[in-house]
């Protein structure tokens, strides 16, 4: 396993297992298989309602806490009585019933651990800065090894400086050959923020893969050349950009493929070919619609 050193010196495995929507009955076996194959990083979130299952799976498979890197996330859903929906136009059910610190603590309880390796704010909600501020507190108390954000654009990242002196260690956001996010990747790299790719293959909130990506006719010949799958070529394209990847699967063949990425390398030309597929196409929520709650001076951002 290759490791990436984050801006505070913490080492993070470059390949992890995404766990969103893995059926509960498959989770324990998948985690055991993944660990056996060499996975040492697991990505979860309060919102996935599987943190406690993951803790149980690690324990029942005899995997020691200190041998794995766990990422989790704090989400607005954890704070409100009803579903918290934040789309382009509205925020509903904004009556909070618990403080952010309690929502963060719940992840510790669910995961049955006294420390979390990486704790992210799940989305740039209008209250994401409040969440980051609390994560900063836990971090400074030594309970979280690294903190970060998800789907943050430059205005979101700049506005964090007003409430925390801790530069996010990681920004996790959607990257795929159809949404290469080159400018945001560079922006983060220039500031020491490690990029982590999510939702590279999937349709949002679905277990269906995106065939336009996994059966991409431009990538297929590259995959054939290396005797790898299209998925592996795409993950390798990310790895060569020094990006952390967390593909989700509970299929043993895919699990094995997704960690077998270090015995081949794409040429510069092949990297450019994949880059050229970019359409700026989001399939997850689009963070360009998530500026509500930011001070006005940040909302005036004109884009890259
Ligand atoms: N921060 C956020 O807001 C956020 C949002 C979304 C996701 N995430 C994190 O990122 C992780 C990954 O994203 P995701 O769950 O959206 O899905 P994903 O990993 O992009 O895609 C999963 C899909 O890809 C298929 N797949 C995986 N490996 C494959 C392979 N080698 N060959 C062919 N198909 C393959 C899976 O099918 P099979 O089951 O058939 O393999 C599944 O349909 C999540 O699990 C979660 O941990 C974070």
Image (cartoon, rainbow, N blue to C red):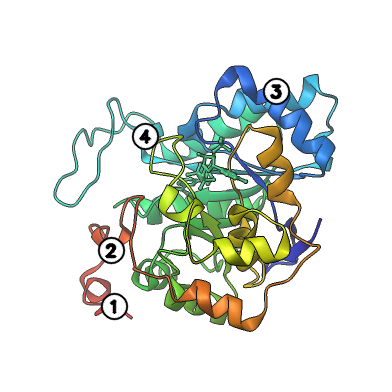
Left or right of 89 on screen, residue 65: right
Q: Marks 4 and 2, how far apart in space?
A: 20 Å
Which numbered disc, 2 or 1, marks the residue that appears first in the sequence?
2
**Residue 179 appears in which quarter of the rendering?**
bottom left
| Residue denoted by label 1 | 303
Image coords of residue 13 (percent x, y) = 74, 55
Left or right of 32 on screen, residue 20: left
| Quarter containing the N terminus | bottom right
Residue 211's place in the image compared with 301, above or below, is above
Residue neighbourhood size for the residue with mark 3, other residues' Cα within 10 Å, grouped as few (<14), some (14–19), many (≥20): many
| Residue denoted by label 2 | 288
| Residue denoted by label 3 | 28
Residue 183's place in the image compared with 36, above or below, is below
Which numbered disc, 3 or 2, marks the residue that appears first in the sequence?
3
Q: Marks 3 and 2, how far apart in space?
A: 37 Å
Q: Residue at x 63, y 61 (%)?
A: 223
Residue neighbourhood size for the residue with mark 4, other residues' Cα within 10 Å, grouped as few (<14), some (14–19), many (≥20): some
Give the SS element for disc 1. loop
């Amino acid at each position: 396993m290759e490791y990436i050193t984050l801006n505070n010196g913490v080492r993070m495995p470059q390949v992890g297992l995404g766990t969103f929507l893995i059926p509960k009955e498959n989770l324990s076996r998948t985690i055991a298989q993944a660990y056996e194959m060499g996975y040492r990083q697991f990505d979860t979130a309060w919102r996935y309602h599987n943190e406690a299952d993951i803790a149980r799976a690690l324990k029942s498979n005899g995997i020691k806490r200190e041998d794995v890197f766990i990422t989790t996330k704090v989400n607005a859903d954890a704070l409100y009585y009803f579903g918290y929906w934040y789309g382009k136009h509205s925020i509903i059910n904004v009556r909070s019933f618990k403080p952010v610190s309690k929502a963060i603590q719940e992840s510790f309880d669910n995961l049955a651990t006294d420390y979390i390796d990486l704790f992210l704010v799940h989305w740039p909600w209008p209250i994401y800065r409040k969440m980051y501020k609390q994560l900063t507190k836990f971090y400074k108390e030594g309970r979280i090894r690294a903190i970060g954000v998800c789907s943050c654009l430059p205005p979101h990242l700049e506005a964090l400086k007003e409430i925390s002196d801790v530069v996010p260690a990681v920004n996790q956001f959607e990257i795929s050959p159809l949404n290469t996010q080159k400018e945001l990747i560079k922006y983060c790299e220039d500031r020491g923020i490690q990029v982590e790719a999510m939702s590279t293959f999937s349709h949002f909130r679905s277990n269906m893969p995106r065939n336009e990506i996994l059966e991409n006719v431009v990538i297929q010949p590259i995959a054939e050349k290396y005797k790898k799958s299209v998925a592996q070529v795409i993950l390798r394209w990310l790895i060569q950009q020094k990006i952390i990847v967390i593909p989700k699967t509970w299929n043993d063949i895919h699990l094995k493929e997704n960690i077998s990425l270090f015995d081949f390398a794409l040429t510069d030309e092949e990297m450019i070919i994949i880059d050229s597929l970019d359409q700026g196409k989001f399939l997850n929520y689009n963070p360009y619609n998530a500026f509500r709650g930011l001070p006005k001076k940040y909302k005036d951002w004109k884009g890259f």
